[in-house]
Amino acid sequence: MITMTETAASKVKELLEAEGDTSLALRVAVRPGGCSGFSYEMFFDGDTSGEDLTQEFNGVRIVVDPSSAQLLTGATLEYKDGLQETGFSINNPNAQRTCGCGNSFS
């Protein structure tokens, strides 16, 4: 299952508070598509199933479906806020190849 840095958890918590519903979870999924075969998807979700894997980091819940969890084992969700890079990224040791835009992998 994916883990989350403290910086990412803090940013997600801030976004949930702005959303006005801190009971939502951050769903992280891997979907077929993108230029390298798979792409990441992240969104706030209030609907979880019994099959979903859930983990909490600093008060933020991450929810992952079982098939995505296989591709995200050992991955880390990060958040950077700097001049060169700003935003969320996933460091995934399972990715053998990534595309130039960094949004898809194989």
Image (cartoon, rainbow, N blue to C red):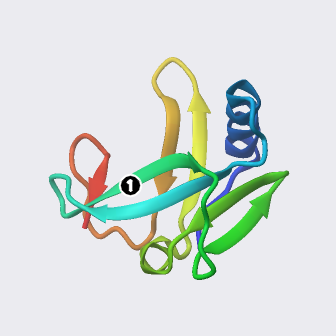
Q: In this orientation, which residue lies closer to the viewer: 29 or 93?
A: 29
- Residue at 59 percent across and 73 percent down: it is 49
In the image, residue 74 sits, relative to residue 102, either above or below, namely: below
Image check: 20 left or right of 28?
Answer: right
Q: In this orientation, which residue lies closer to the viewer: 98 or 43?
A: 43
Image check: 28 left or right of 32?
Answer: right
- Count of numbered circles in the view: 1
- Residue at 67 percent across and 43 percent down: it is 8
Amino acid at circle 1 = Tyr
Work out which quarter of the rendered image holds the N terminus and state it.
Answer: bottom right
Q: Provide residue 44's location: percent of width, then percent of height.
A: 58, 46
In the image, residue 31 sits, relative to residue 71, either above or below, namely: above
User: Quarter of the image holding residue 93?
Assistant: bottom left
Work out which quarter of the rendered image holds the C terminus and state it.
Answer: bottom left
What residue did someone put label 1 on? 40
Image check: 98 left or right of 79?
Answer: left
- Residue at 60 percent across and 60 percent down: it is 47
In the image, residue 73 sits, relative to residue 89, either above or below, namely: below
Q: In this orientation, which residue lies closer to the viewer: 76 or 65?
A: 65
**How would you rate the neighbour count of disc 1 (Cα within 10 Å): few for under 14, some for 14-19, many for 20 or more?**
some
Q: Provide residue 33's location: percent of width, then percent of height.
A: 20, 58
Q: Which element type, helix, strand or loop, lies under badge 1? A: strand
Q: Provide residue 61's location: percent of width, then percent of height.
A: 73, 57
Work out which residue is located at the far right of the displayed protein and give it. 59
In the image, residue 33 sits, relative to residue 51, either above or below, namely: above
Q: In this orientation, which residue lies closer to the viewer: 40 or 45?
A: 45
Work out which residue is located at the far left of the displayed protein and give it. 35
- Residue at 56 percent across and 56 percent down: it is 27
